[in-house]
Image (cartoon, rainbow, N blue to C red):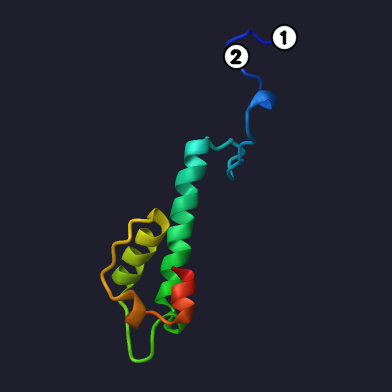
Amino acid sequence: MGANAGEMTRGALPFPRTVNGNGRALAPEQVLVLGFAGAITVGTILLSLPIAHAPGKSVSLLDALFTAVSAVCVTGLVTVDTRTTWSTFGHAVI
C-alpha cells in the first residue's frame, strides 16, 4: 500500500464528494447544509405561488418561508392555519 495507515486516498472515501463550480470538492457537511437551504428555498417559492393558497387567502413571503423551514426541519410550528390557508397543492408542498 502506498498510503500510510492513517491517511485515506481519494478513492477510499465512504461516499463520493460533490464538486462545486471552482473544481473543489464539497465536504459532506456542506452538501447537507446546501441541501437544506435548497429545499427551504424551493418550498418558499412554491408556497408563495397563488396556486398554493386556499381561495380568498393570501400569505406573506415571511409566512411561506417560516412554513417551508418548519416543514423541512420537521418542527411542526406554523404561523397560519394549515388546513384553511393552503390549497391541495400547498398541502402537497408541505
**Residue 1 location (% of width, % of height):** 73, 8
Q: Is residue 66 left or right of residue 23?
A: left
Which quadrant of the structure image shows residue 2? top right
Q: Which mark is residue 62?
A: none
- At x 35%, y 70%, the residue is 64
Which quadrant of the structure image shows residue 17? top right
The residue at the far left in this view is 79
- At x 48%, y 56%, the residue is 38
Q: Is residue 85 above or below residue 21?
A: below
- At x 46%, y 83%, the residue is 51
Density class for disc 1 (Cα within 10 Å; few <14, some 14-19, many ≥20) is few
**Residue 58 location (% of width, % of height):** 32, 84
Q: Is residue 74 above or below residue 92?
A: above
The residue at the far bottom in this view is 56
Identify the residue position indicated by label 2 in the image. 7
**Identity, as a three-letter code, of the amino acid under mark 2:** Glu
- 3D distance between C-alphas at marks 2 and 1: 10 Å
Disc 2 secondary structure class? loop
Q: Is residue 7 above or below residue 85?
A: above
- At x 63%, y 34%, the residue is 15
**Identity, as a three-letter code, of the amino acid under mark 1:** Gly
Density class for disc 2 (Cα within 10 Å; few <14, some 14-19, many ≥20) is few
Disc 1 secondary structure class? loop
**Residue 41 location (% of width, % of height):** 44, 62
Quadrant, the C terminus: bottom left
Q: Is residue 19 left or right of residue 32?
A: right
Q: Earlier in the sequence, mark 2 or mark 1?
A: 1
- Give 19 or 46, whichever is nearer the viewer: 46
Identify the residue position indicated by label 1 in the image. 2
Which quadrant of the structure image shows residue 18? top right
